[in-house]
Image (tube, rainbow, N blue to C red):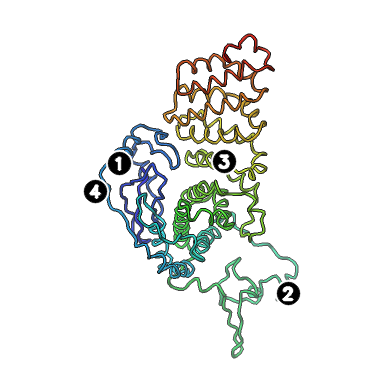
Amino acid sequence: MDPRRSPTKMPTKPKTVRNRFANSKTPRVRNMQKREQGKSGGSGGGGAAPPAKRGRPFGSGSGSASAAASAADSAAPSTLLGPSLHVHNSFADQNNKRIVLALQSGLKSELTWALNTLTLLSFKEKDDMRKDATPLAKIPGLLDALLQAIDDWRDIALPKELAKSTRVRTLGANSVVTGFGNEYQALGSTSALHRPGVGSGSAGIESTQHSGVTKSRFTELWLDEDGLFNLDDEGRAEKQQCAVAASNIIRNFSFMPDNEVIMAQHRHCLETAFQCIEDHLVEDEELVTNALETIVNLAPLLDLRIFSSSKPSFIKITEKRAIQAIMGMLESAVKAWHCAAAELLGRLIINPDNEPFLLPFFPQIHKRLIDLISMPALDAQAAAIGALYNLAEVNMDCRLKIANERWAIDRLLKVIKTPHPVPEVCRKAAMILESLVSEPQNRSLLLAYENAFAEILFTDGRYSDTFARILYELTSRPNNKVATARGIWGM
């Protein structure tokens, strides 16, 4: 199970405590330190399967052992569950300005304190009594300050080989001053350090004349002062840790109903999250996971038209680019990512305003979802069927494409016959088949499975009503050519 960590200072090693909420939707507390649990688990050679993912029905995990362990934890007395963190409900109200200023300061000690504090405040247990606490996303400037911590990392996260190379200038090569912003190089100045891309040229140099001596001072030299982040590899690692911690806090915010509306209408927040999942091939895995889960939590309230609205934009994410980022996660081989992406698509399609942006991607979406149903992972099957259940209700074209997809009917029937350990998943699979048979163009395809439908009708009483309606639609409609021969199912 994914251990819950208590916040601590950056130089110390993370501590692990037992996770009480492995199968619940309660936000988890993460430390700013980089997770090493995957590495240590791989070296140990343990074969324990992970528990069910957040948002999945209980029992959808890939192993019975983990489910039993989770059930044992939930049934254990509270005195055996390890330490618990409690924060006074007035702490955020009394210190909200200090927290925001600490995030904006750029000082490592202040930023560490603010991130640790917010990690505690954003973590809310199921029986937490902080009902009257101020929603953290409503604190002025807090969400923007957290996003700035992520943006600071994103600005330096590109690999060095992707950095823009220096362009060779030949025009005016014989002149002392070229006019291309490299005057200090032409004059042979060695008193200042040249850093490409940060205040280069006359805009980044403040020159004063004293006794005939020219002194150049760069505006970026404040980065070298004590208490700030360095520009070396150690400084980059610290920036990355801060970005991961900030993303985890934003993720925890998204679980709170009081924060959902504000965050779903915050364009900068959505643009940052979509940009993180868009760069999942090169970005930190935990940062990508936090961004994806944030979007999944906000999906019921998310309107993709916000990316073309008049609200100020910081990253220029478009509706098409956002859907392409989700498709990249859906095609990923990481189970947690493609399961969350399938769940996200199923939630987005509920909003009719999102349909025009999703319709061009439907052939790719339903093909990948049907592939996920064939996977042995039970949570992948549950996520795919949940998304197909909503997609099948969109329009006739979607139902026709799903029915004509190879192996679609077979795999849906297999989920019901196996059966999937979560009855709700089997029920949705049966409802998908009922939606498909409602289209006359699909009945010729579904008639080939009439015997399979009849077998489930007589052997499984839980879904007998659904399959009775399916057989009625297949054989008793006036426009069906074989209605007279097989009309007994409608009697």
How far is mark 4 from mark 2, CA to CA? 79 Å
- Between circles 4 and 2, the one closer to the viewer is 4
- Judging by the rendered image, the residue that carries numbered circle 1 is 73
Asked whether 178 or 120 is in front, the reply is 120
Crowding around mark 1 (Cα neighbors within 10 Å: few <14, some 14 to 19, many 20+) is some
Q: Which amino acid type is shown beneath numbered disc 1?
A: Asp
Q: Are marks 1 and 3 in contact (CB under 8 Å)?
A: no
In percent of the image, x 65 and y 22: which residue is there? 442
Crowding around mark 3 (Cα neighbors within 10 Å: few <14, some 14 to 19, many 20+) is many
**Mark toward the start of the polypeptide (1 vs 2):** 1
How far is mark 4 from mark 1, CA to CA? 11 Å
Question: In the figure, 396 relative to 3: above or below?
Answer: above
How far is mark 1 from mark 3, CA to CA? 32 Å
Name the residue at the right extreme: 171
**Mark toward the start of the polypeptide (4 vs 1):** 1
In percent of the image, x 49 and y 30: which residue is there? 375
How far is mark 3 from mark 4, CA to CA? 40 Å
Q: Quadrant of the C terminus?
A: top right
**Mark toward the start of the polypeptide (3 vs 4):** 4
Q: Which amino acid type is shown beneath numbered disc 3?
A: Leu
